Image: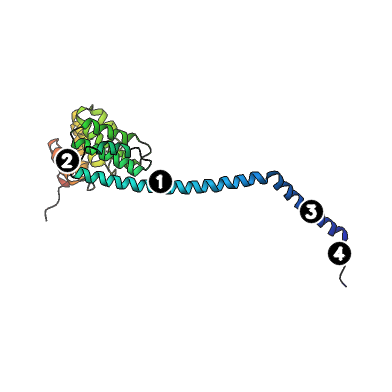
C-alpha cells in the first residue's frame, strides 16, 4: 500500500517554492527597469558597432576608388589637385589608404623635384606607429636614400642598423647605404666585407649585387664567387 506523503515535507517544499517566487518577483521589481535599460543599451551598442563597421567598410571602398582616380589623373599629367586630395586621404582611419596616400604624395613630390616635401612624407610614415612595420621600414629606407648626401655617416649607419642585416627584407638597400657610409668613415675593409655579403645574398636585387661585387673588389675584398657561373 502506498505511503501517504509526509505533510511536513510537502509544506516545506511549498514554502520554499513560494519564497523563491517572491524573491524573483522582488528582484525584478527592484532591478527590472535597470535590466531593461541595460538590455537596450547592449542592443544599441551592438547595432552601433555593426553600423560603424559597415560605414568604415563603405568609406574605405570610396577612398580606394578615389585613389584610383588620382592615379589615373597623375598618369595623364593632371597633378594640380592631387596633393590636396592625397593630404585628405592621408588622414584616413584605414591604414592601407593612409599609407598609400602618403607614399603616393612622396612619389609625386620626387617627380616634381621637391625632395624636401618627399622627405617629410616619408618621415611621417616612418613615425606613424599605427602603420605596419613593413610600411615604416620602406619609408625609412627611402627617406635615408634622399637624405644620404646631407647626413653624417654615423647617422646613416645607426638608422639603417636594424635593416642592414642578412635576412631582412631591406638588406640590399640598407646594407648598401651602410657600406657607403663606412667608406666615408674610412672603414674600407669593413665596408668591403659588407659589400661581399650583399653580393652573395641571392635575395638582394641583382643591380645591388652586381655593384657590390665591383665595389668589394675595389676595396680589396674578393666577392667574385658571387658571380653567376658560366654555363
- SS class, disc 3: helix
Which residue in the protein does label 2 denote? 212
- Residue drawn at x 26%, y 28% is 155
- Which one is in front, 126 or 108? 108
Question: Residue 107 location, x and y as percent?
Answer: 23, 39
Relative image position of residue 172 (x, y in whole percent): 23, 41
Instruction: Name the residue carrying label 1.
Output: 56
| Residue drawn at (23%, 30%) of the image | 116
| Quadrant that contains the C terminus | bottom left
State the residue position of label 4.
5
Residue at point 21% right, 33% down?
A: 146
Spatial CA distance of label 1 from label 4 is 67 Å
Chain-order first, disc 3 or disc 2 = 3
Which of label 4 and label 3 is nearer to you? 3
Q: CA distance from mark 2 to mark 1?
A: 47 Å
- Find disc 3 in the rendering and name its residue: 18
Amino acid at each position: 500500500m502506498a505511503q501517504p506523503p509526509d505533510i511536513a515535507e510537502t509544506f516545506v517544499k511549498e514554502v520554499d517554492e513560494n519564497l523563491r517566487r517572491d524573491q524573483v518577483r522582488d528582484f525584478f521589481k527592484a532591478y527590472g527597469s535597470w535590466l531593461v535599460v541595460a538590455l537596450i543599451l547592449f542592443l544599441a551598442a551592438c547595432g552601433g558597432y555593426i553600423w560603424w563597421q559597415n560605414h568604415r567598410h563603405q568609406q574605405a571602398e570610396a577612398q580606394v576608388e578615389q585613389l584610383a582616380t588620382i592615379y589615373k589623373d597623375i598618369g595623364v599629367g593632371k597633378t594640380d589637385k592631387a596633393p590636396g586630395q592625397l593630404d585628405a586621404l592621408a588622414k584616413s582611419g584605414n591604414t592601407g589608404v593612409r599609407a598609400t596616400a602618403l607614399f603616393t604624395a612622396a612619389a609625386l613630390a620626387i617627380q616634381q623635384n621637391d625632395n624636401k616635401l618627399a622627405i617629410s612624407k616619408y618621415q611621417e610614415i616612418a613615425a606613424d606607429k599605427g602603420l605596419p612595420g613593413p610600411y615604416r621600414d620602406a619609408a625609412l629606407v627611402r627617406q635615408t636614400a634622399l637624405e644620404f648626401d646631407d647626413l653624417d655617416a654615423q647617422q646613416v649607419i645607426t638608422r639603417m642598423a636594424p635593416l642592414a642585416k642578412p635576412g631582412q627584407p631591406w638588406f640590399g638597400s640598407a646594407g648598401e647605404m651602410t657600406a657607403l657610409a663606412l667608406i666615408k668613415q674610412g672603414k674600407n675593409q669593413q665596408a668591403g666585407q659588407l659589400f661581399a655579403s650583399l653580393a652573395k645574398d641571392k635575395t638582394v636585387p641583382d643591380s645591388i649585387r652586381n655593384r657590390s661585387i665591383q665595389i668589394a673588389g675595389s676595396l680589396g675584398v674578393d666577392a667574385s664567387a658571387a658571380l653567376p657561373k658560366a654555363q
